[in-house]
Amino acid sequence: MLTTFISAGVVVLIHQHLGQLKMVVEPTLILIVGGGIGLMTLPAMTAVQTFVGQLVANATHLTPILMGIVLGIIFGILIVSPLSSVGIATAISLTGTGSGAANAGIVVTSFVLAWFGATVNPLGGTLAHFLGSPKIQMANMLRRPRLFIPVIMGSGLCGGAASWLGMSGTPFSAGFGFSGLIGPLTALQQSHGQLVGLRVLLAFVIIPVIVSVVLKWGFIDGWHLIATDDVRLPND
């Protein structure tokens, strides 16, 4: 993503200044400048993702509820960051209860951001948060870091709840959340014990919805720390 961003910036800067040489020179400059900076920054980017991966791996050694809270928060943040939640989960083979908690953190992040912006975003944009990915809010999150506060609170609560309810998953499902119903359906297949269907419904629908409503009431309607326009999606 960094390399793509830099390359797009190069296009904006040079596109109008190359004249008839545009077709020949522009692709070469983009490859040299964008690709060169991408190669130079690769070690740093790799180090960041390795650090996050180690952080996630260490969290799996905590007690179940605490592990669920920590993993829920980490993956709630990852899903609205430039880093890949799926890539990190598969890289460390995150499975079992840890996968379920991570998934719950992503699910509630989807619901929180969708509910916060429901009055200013079109229906398609609202549904895209959990039918697609809450990563569509990445620009707003990075521009307004205060949005991470309700995300952290919600993902911690739901991650802990998912662990308590015994939700399980696979490395592949851990980073997807509600998208394509991959998280809930995998938990339905992987989790054990009685009333699995009800526990999945609680972990991935009922509790996230309740948490989202409470957080919106607190942060937007009550304390006025966040405005609905903070999560408005671009119209174009």
Image (cartoon, rainbow, N blue to C red):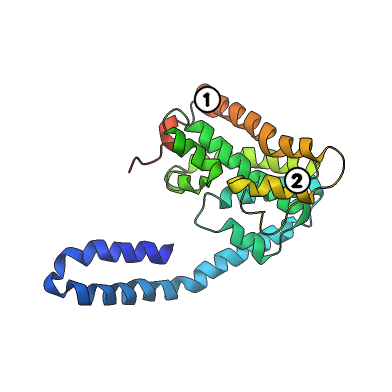
* Residue drawn at the location 41% of the way across and 36% of the way down: 232
Q: How many marks?
A: 2
As drawn, which residue projects farthest toward the top?
222
Image quarter in which the N terminus is found: bottom left
Which residue is under mark 2?
188
What is the x, y in percent for residue 70? 69, 49
Disc 2, SS: helix
Q: Quadrant of residue 121?
A: top left
Lower sequence index among marks 2 and 1: 2
What is the x, y in percent for residue 225? 49, 30
Image quarter in which the C terminus is found: top left
Mark 2 or mark 1, whichever is nearer to me: 2
As drawn, which residue projects farthest toward the right?
193
Q: Amino acid at mark 2?
A: Leu
Is 192 placed left or right of 143 in the picture? right
Q: Amino acid at mark 1?
A: Trp
Tag 1: Cα neighbours inside 10 Å, few (<14), some, or many (≥20)? few
Is 222 placed left or right of 55 in the picture? left
Q: Quadrant of residue 235?
A: top left
Which residue is under mark 1?
223
* Residue drawn at the location 71% of the way across and 59% of the way down: 94
Tag 2: Cα neighbours inside 10 Å, few (<14), some, or many (≥20)? some
* Residue drawn at the location 68% of the way across and 50% of the way down: 102
Which of the pair 192/134 is nearer the observer?
192
Asked if residue 44 is positioned above or below residue 97 in the image, the reply reads below
Residue 70 seen in render: no
What label sits on residue 177 in the rendered view? none
